[in-house]
Image (spheres, rainbow, N blue to C red):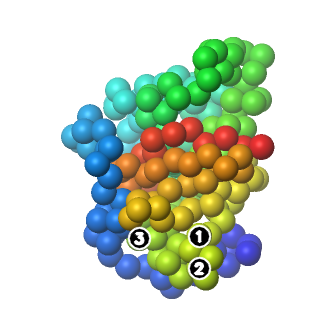
Amino acid sequence: MKISQIVLSLSLLMSSTIIFAQCSTNQHQPSHVTNVSWSHHRDIVDIAASNESLSTLVTAVQAADLVSTLKADGPYTVFAPVNSAFAKLPDGVLNSLLEPGNKKKLSEILTYHVVAGKFKAAEVLNAIQASPKGSFAIKTVSGQTLKAMLRSGTVVLEDQNGNFAAVTKPDVNASNGVIHIIDSVVLPK
């Protein structure tokens, strides 16, 4: 399915974000993320930089020279891993990725968390529910795909390696898109 078809399908399937918020309620949701004062007048980078639980992501975005990209008009949808998500990576992987010689690989991983366009939670949920397979493919800025689905009432992403990341806080609005907080780093092949 082409991105234009996905956008059209998602536009036709819009509904209340309340449904998604109820479906994505997760008892493992970190309280330090939900208590942050979010402002849609700031861009994606500014919002991430103002939240301590996203400091590792901000460091990685800086190391990959993606700050100006994520400050651009967009719109973008960013699946933003919290610090504890990066801590789940095998020992030494994050430090290695932050080295200047690995900027290309780091950029590929980070852009795998970004989608062109602004996709609110309700649109994602409706696309999942409308799919006969119970999931749908999301093409990322890196050119690879993530699969979105529901698991135990929570929206999760499956990466190309079969790993999962749960959305713990949907619809953090930014001036240039939307952020969905996730509990794991997704990795491209």
| 22 versus 91 height, above or below | below
Residue 56's spot in the image, x, y percent? Answer: 48, 25
Q: Does the residue at mark 3 contact the one at mark 1 (Cβ under 8 Å)? A: no
| 2 relative position to 129: left or right | right
Looking at the rendered structure, the kind of residue marked 3 is Ala
Numbered label attached to residue 135: 1
Question: Label 3 to label 2, Cα distance in Å?
Answer: 14 Å
- Classify residue 54 by image quadrant: top left
Q: From this viewpoint, is residue 112 visible? A: yes
At 37% from the left edge and 43% from the top edge, which residue is drawn?
A: 42
Q: 180 or 154, which is in the foreground?
A: 154
Q: In the rendered image, which residue does mark 2 sit on?
A: 131
Q: Mark 3 or mark 2: which is in front?
A: 2
Q: State the SS at label 1.
A: strand
Horizontal and vertical percent position of residue 86: 52, 29
Q: Residue at x 73, y 75 (%)?
A: 1
Separation of marks 3 and 1 at Cα, in angstroms: 14 Å
- Asked whether disc 2 touches disc 1, contact meaning CB atoms under 8 Å apart, the reply is yes
The mark found on residue 122 in the picture is: 3
- Give the CA separation, mark 2 to mark 1: 6 Å
Number of marks drawn? 3
Residue 95 rendering spot, x and y as whole percentages: 62, 15
Q: Is residue 150 left or right of residue 6?
A: left
Q: Residue at x 46, y 70 (%)?
A: 125
Disc 1 residue type (three-letter) = Ser
